[in-house]
Amino acid sequence: MKKVVLIVLMAFFAFSTNAFAAYTAISHDLTVSQPAQHKISVGLWSSTNETVELSLYSKGPLGQLSKVFSTTVNIGPTTPSPVEYSVGYLSPGTYVIKGEFQGTYGSLGPVSLHQVY
């Protein structure tokens, strides 16, 4: 019985450690005024090699976020920055970019949203 409790506690703390190991950075509001194809340009930095989930969200009138685009990027201290991705057709509105770093710290910025001509 003691072994079962110990195993359960170890599993719980292992999960807790992983759950809090990530760091999330969010951009300022980005405005789209004309419906068109767009791309994002995002400066990313980390002192170690790690994986970042980069996501673009549309922002509703009450601040609710809806994911529009997502990709995974591997970065490190020598990775060229910024990175650019086509995010497809965007309607007029407000958008934000989130970077979820798998490590404990990373930097997101500068960020921009450009219409593709």
Image: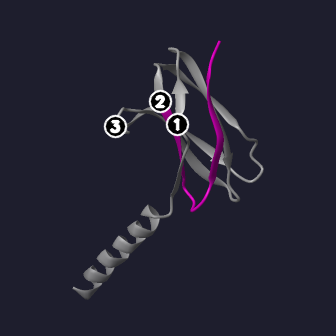
Q: Are marks 2 and 1 in contact (CB under 8 Å)?
A: yes
Q: Amino acid at mark 3?
A: Leu
Between 96 and 6, the one nearer to me in the picture: 96
- Is residue 115 one of those drawn in magenta? yes
User: Which residue carries the number 2 mark?
Assistant: 94
Between 24 and 14, the one nearer to me in the picture: 24
Count neighbours of disc 3 (C-alpha within 10 A) and say few if under 14, some if 14 to 19, many if 20 or more: few
Q: Is residue 84 left or right of residue 21?
A: right
User: Which residue carries the number 3 mark?
Assistant: 62
Residue 66 appears in the figure: yes
* Mark positioned earlier in the residue sequence (2 or 1): 1
Rendered position, 69 above or below 117 = below
Q: Residue at left 70%, top 52%? A: 76
Q: Are marks 2 and 3 in contact (CB under 8 Å)?
A: no
Residue 52: x percent and y percent?
Answer: 57, 47
Residue 55 appears in the figure: no
* Mark positioned earlier in the residue sequence (2 or 3): 3
User: For residue 60, what is the image quadrant?
Assistant: top left
In the rendered view of the protein, which quadrant contains the N terminus?
Answer: bottom left
Rendered position, 22 above or below 28 = below
Q: Which residues are magenta?
A: 94-117
User: Which residue carries the number 1 mark?
Assistant: 29
Label 1 – label 3 distance at C-alpha: 14 Å
